[in-house]
Amino acid sequence: MNYKLLSLGVFLFAIFLVGSEAPFIKMTNAKCQSYNKSWVEIHYCRLKAYSRNKTSLNVNLTVLETANNIHLRLKLMKRANGYKPFLWDYTVDACEFMRKRNQPVAKIFWNMIKDVSTVNHTCPYVGLQSLNDFHRPEIPVPMPSGEYLLLLNWIFDRKPQFATNVYFTLVEDP
């Protein structure tokens, strides 16, 4: 009986050690594509390198038509002989989330961008939207080292309008 309790304690301690390591995250590429330029015009979508280990993401776009029904599809992929689905493939009603903020996966994403984004109010969205100087995101879930791709597909009125693809490398501290 004591052996089982000791094993459980060691297991929980190991999970704590794995989860408490601070991973090093570096964004390596960013690609944005507008599917419908009469709705969304992307001015720029690029990474700015400050040093070898620090890059920041800057996205600037204009929503030309009023968007009232917005969905966001988040998909995380891990590179393993090509990019394969890894952890999330999740669609969220962005307008509802901005009103209630009660969806856990969307909340993780929101907590990373809320301080550097102009997307901080409820629907409707129209006009200039930007993400400025986004760097060194904190990911609150343990993930293995590797190369990842975060696919963000923005859907207005049930039609895909634009995509934001962010490539990053995650390395656990030695």
Image (cartoon, grey):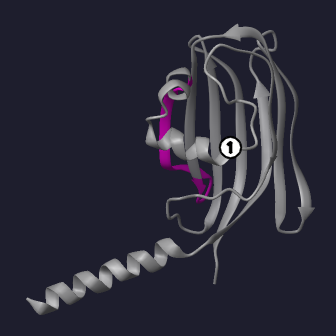
Question: Could you say whether the residue bearing mark 1 is in a helix, strand or loop?
Answer: helix
Per the rendered image, the range of residues in magenta is: 78-94
Residue at x 83% of width, y 63% of height: 54
Q: Which residue is mark 1?
A: 113
The rendered magenta stretch, by its main secondary structure, is classed as strand
Q: Is residue 93 magenta?
A: yes
Q: Quadrant of residue 119?
A: top right
Answer above or below: position of 83 versus 156.
below
Residue at x 31% of width, y 81% of height: 11
Q: Residue furthest left?
A: 1
Q: x and y percent of residue 38 in the render?
A: 81, 9
Q: Is residue 138 magenta?
A: no
Residue at x 74% of width, y 37% of height: 117
Nearer to us in this view, 171 or 94: 94
Nearer to us in this view, 15 or 90: 15
Answer above or below: position of 125 versus 166.
above
Q: Quadrant of residue 120?
A: top right
Q: x and y percent of residue 71 in the render?
A: 56, 23
Residue at x 65% of width, y 49% of height: 149
Q: x and y percent of residue 165 in the render?
A: 71, 40
The quadrant of the rendering that contains the C terminus is: bottom right
- Please give the count of numbered marks on the rendered protein: 1
Q: Residues within 10 Å of mark 1 (few under 14, many from 20)?
A: some
Q: x and y percent of residue 77 in the render?
A: 57, 49
Task: Give the residue type that dot 1 points to.
Answer: Ile
The quadrant of the rendering that contains the N terminus is: bottom left
Nearer to us in this view, 56 or 161: 56
